[in-house]
Structure formats: C-alpha cells, structure tokens
Image (tube, rainbow, N blue to C red):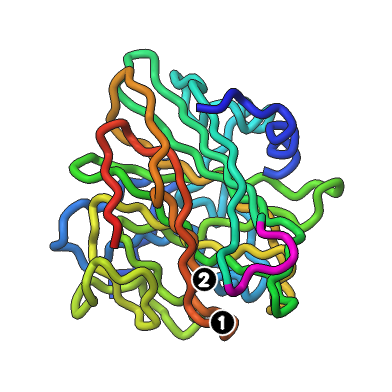
Amino acid sequence: MKLIDYVLVGFLCGIASANVNAQMGFVALPKVGNVQSAYVLCNPTGEYGLSAASVPNEVANNACAVSNPELLASPTNAPLDGFRLVGMLVSDVEMPKPEVGQHPDVAVLTDAIWRNKENTECILGTHLQMKDSPLNNGQYWEVNDIARAGFAGRDVAIAYYHKLPSAEIGGGAEVLFRAGRTFTSVKTSPDYKTLPATQTAPAASLPVNEKNTAAVSDNWVDFTTDLSFKDLDGVTRKNSSIFYIKYPCDAQDPVSKPGAVRFRTSGQNGQPPKEIAAPGLVPIDGAVEQY
C-alpha cells in the first residue's frame, strides 16, 4: 500500500416496496437473496442530487451517518472507537476512449483501511474527488454510484461521514442517498418512491439498470450519490462523503486488485449509462468478478 499522502489528507480535512429506513451509524446490509430490496435508505433528501440535500445532524437526516470529535479533527481518524489507520492508497481515475478529453485523469480515488486492536474487524473507507477535466464533448463526468468488490460470505455494515463544505475547496460534499448489497446500480428518479426491488430483478451481473430493480450480490457493496465537477442539473458536488464498509478480517493487509471499484453514470441527467472499472483495495482473500 502507498504511504499516507499528507497533501490529500489535508484536502480531506477540508471537506470531507421496501422503503427501509436505516438508523444512525453503521447499518447492516443483507447477504442473502430473500429480501425485498438489496438496498437501505440513508439520506432521502435532495431527490438524489437534483436539488441540494439536507446534511445529516443529530436530530434529522442522519441514517447511516457517523460523526465524532476525532472525525471532526481529521477524517484519517477512524469512524468507530478501537480502530486504527493501517494504510491508505491514493490513485487517479482515468477516463477511457472515446470520451476522454484533453486530460485523462478525471478524479482522485482514496482508499483507507482501519483495523481494530483485536485484528477481527476492518473498515474500508472510500473518497472520490472530481477533477477539472472536461470530456471530449465539453461536459463533465458524473458519478451516481460507486460499487466495491470482495465481500462474499462476510457480514457487512455501511456508514458515511459528511463534513460541511469549506470555502477553500468549493463544491462541498454530497451525502449518501442509499447503499446496497448488489453489483447493480439503479438509475435514480424522484418518481421512484421505494427502494429498488429484488423481485423481477435482472441478472446480478448487470452494471446499471434503468428500472427500479436490483438483485442481491453478496460480493458487492454499492453507494448511491451524485458527483461531478460541474453538474448538468446545477447542483454541483465535487467531493463524495467518506463511505465506509465494516467487515470481519484478520491481521493480514488488504490488497489492490484490478476492477475492484466500479464508477457508474446511471443517466440521471439524460447521459447514457456508463461504467469505469478501477483498481482498489479488497480483503486479501476477496474476489473480483470480471463480468
């Protein structure tokens, strides 16, 4: 793993019909198929990014959200007591042809791993920062979902940390709208009043579905948000919140594997569905299906 990038750490310190309502803090995701939805609802405000979402606080909009004095001091601190930072991986995300513009690097991905003192649980953190890199059509890449691999057979819980925007950074951070135990990202729409259903869902290998269905896939965790350096809908959020996945582990460090992270454009603003695969950290014995 790459040693901690202190420049990026400084940046992070500046931002940072199954309608299941999750509780505050880490929320367990299903790992079997006999559920009505693979997803849990986290922050239901903002119409999935079409308008400004209400930020989580102590009394409202705080499902799946975590915060503590240590996180407020630095997001390199763990979201839970008893965990320590053991590694961080920072990498550029490149836009492939034919959409690539003058600059191929369109975002910066940061992976971070925290492990508890007993070496029995780990937390994988994900942060994405969009770059000023227009595509060849002059528009900017939009990320609606981030999916991560490597969790088959494990009990998984998710959470996110949202820090209020800093004037020095601009753009602010987007919240987590929902999260799912699935490979399939689902196009968001204010018309969808329920979470994506498992009934009549297409094959679990489908990256993006325009209908409101998604199959359970216990190897994958999907985070739904709305990121762009310049969003077509006028509500621009250049930075993600920090998304967390807590899972059982041992003292062995995770490894980087190709295709472990998938960034999806689901077509919220009329764009064609798109997936970009990138390397990312997975548990040492975790697998990445190459669909």
The circle on residue 183 is none
Q: Is residue 122 shown to the viewer in this render?
A: yes
Horizontal side of 37 relative to 141 (left or right) equals left
Q: Is residue 97 magenta?
A: no
Front in this rendered view, residue 237 or 263: 263
Give coordinates of residue 134: x percent, y percent.
73, 68
- The outermost residue toward the right is 168
Front in this rendered view, residue 24 or 170: 170
- The outermost residue toward the left is 34
Image point (46%, 67%), residue name: 275
Q: CA distance from mark 1 to mark 2?
A: 7 Å
Image point (69%, 38%), residue name: 12
For the C terminus, the image quarter is bottom left
> Which residues are the magenta region?
98-104
Image point (74%, 32%), residue name: 7
Give coordinates of residue 274: x percent, y percent.
48, 72
Q: Are marks 1 and 2 in contact (CB under 8 Å)?
A: yes
Question: Which amino acid, by three-letter code, is at mark 1?
Answer: Gln
Q: In the figure, 37 relative to 5: above or below? A: below
Question: Which amino acid, by three-letter code, is at mark 2?
Answer: Thr
Q: Give SS at disc 2.
A: strand
Horizontal side of 278 relative to 252 (left or right) equals right
The circle on residue 265 is 2
Give coordinates of residue 18: x percent, y percent.
29, 70
Horizontal side of 194 relative to 93 (left or right) equals left
Q: Is residue 25 shown to the viewer in this render?
A: no
**Mark 2: few/some/many CA within 10 Å (<14, 14-19, 20+):** many
Q: In the figure, 263 relative to 244: above or below? A: below
Q: Give SS at disc 1.
A: loop
The circle on residue 271 is 1
Q: In the figure, 113 relative to 182: above or below? A: above
